[in-house]
Amino acid sequence: MSQGKNISDREKLICTHPHAALTRNTRGRYAPLAPENIRNEYQRDVHRIAYSQPFRRLRNKTQVFYLPENDHICTRLEHSLHVANAARTVARALNLNEDLAEAIGLGHDLGHAPFGHHGEFVLGEICKREGIAPDFHHEVNSLRVVDKLAQLDRNPTHGLNLTYEVRDGIVSHNGEDFNQRIIKPFEGDKDLDKIKLRRDAGNAISMEGCIVRLVDKVAYAGRDLEDGIKAKLIDPNLIPKNLRDTLGKENGTIVGTLIKDIVNCSSKSDKYIALSQEKFDALNELLKYNYKNIYLGERVQQYRIRATRSIKHLFEVLMETLKETKRFENSEKSKILSPNGKSIKSGGLDVFKNFISDIGYKDDESDAQICIDFISGFTDQYVLRFLEEVFVPKAIV
């Protein structure tokens, strides 16, 4: 893929790691873009992600706490920015490609469902029940989002048309893998379109993608701890002493400690990104501490029942709507049906109708897949707004 000589020369001067991903070696995009002399291909992907609608919606998607009213509680958007910044820092220190690391970091969670990992679990149960997929994993859905569902501003076409390396890093980031201290890039060809589960993706093919896979956990471990303290789920004085001594007492120190360790332990010439055994063990202990005291805490768990009901009800209503309207081809019945069988008007229905029209689903794509695609893009707030339109009676006079 051609690009301005000055851009290519500058990249070679900066990305001096022998295994850095240079944009001149990219495996390209589905549809080639006209070359330009200002940005390299990975910078263009940074901007394509940042200007996309799914990226904006991350500001109202759960990181840990549903529908937080405290502006200082982390959202999925902030987490993505944290990962992108940390990944860029590590890439710069190792003379790898900062732009590629940043692009993967910004895009890695674009496919997250509303209500965080619990929403992901509920959609997974629906996928298995409906027989449309073996599960719902946000890594795989993030690839589906950037390839098929995402939209750039008001651009009429869908899909962000990203480079192969960014797409690979997104689907391969696997933030739930706590077993790899040393992460080596995947060797060989990988057909991204055939990946159905997070385990099928393996490690990223690039060093930069491996950075994101590791710093994803670094970025949320300390930050979630801070939010747990703000929510009064954790007493900072009761955090185990060995964690405070090894990693630090607050998020900035924790992240700084782990980022420095990654830089010091990763290879400057060979192909691997790593943490020291000491810091890796401490990070995993911190994550287990967070799971026990935050993620599985009683106050968080009580909202999961409501989140489950909300998503299931929403799916049922949308499925019924597609059935009754024959995917909105029957204009007389193109109204959402309430639980008592009466039809009602809904602004959310118009959004759903336009969504289907814009994506251009084929006949062999199931109604269930359409509903999963639509729901997975919802913010937490929009789930509630949509359900209110459907279930709450409105005055007609």
Image (cartoon, rainbow, N blue to C red):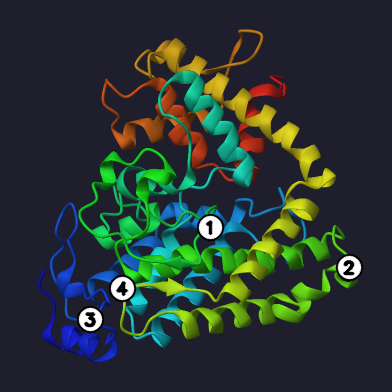
**In the figure, residue 289 lies in which quadrant?**
bottom right
Q: Are marks 2 and 3 in contact (CB under 8 Å)?
A: no
Mark toward the viewer: 3 or 1: 1
Mark 2 lies on residue = 238
The residues tagged by marks 1 and 4 sit, at their Cα atoms, a distance apart of 31 Å
Horizontal side of 242 relative to 75 (left or right) equals right
In this orientation, which residue lies closer to the viewer: 335 or 128? 128
Q: Name the residue rendered at 72%, 24% in the picture.
A: 392
Q: Is residue 114 above or below residue 69?
A: above
Q: Tell me the SS state at disc 4.
A: helix
In the drawing, what numbered circle is on residue 38? 3
Mark toward the viewer: 1 or 4: 1
Residue 247 percent location from the top left of the image: 69, 78
The residues tagged by marks 3 and 4 sit, at their Cα atoms, a distance apart of 9 Å
Please rate how many residues cluster around mark 4, counting C-alpha atoms within 10 Å: few if below 14, some from 14 to 19, many from 20: some
In this orientation, which residue lies closer to the viewer: 246 or 134? 246
Mark 4 lies on residue = 43
Mark 1 lies on residue = 179
Q: Earlier in the sequence, mark 3 or mark 4?
A: 3
Q: Quadrant of the C terminus?
A: top right
Residue 270 percent location from the top left of the image: 31, 78
Q: Earlier in the sequence, mark 2 or mark 4?
A: 4
Q: Name the residue rendered at 50%, 39% in the picture.
A: 376
Q: Is residue 230 visible?
A: yes
In the drawing, what numbered circle is on residue 24? none
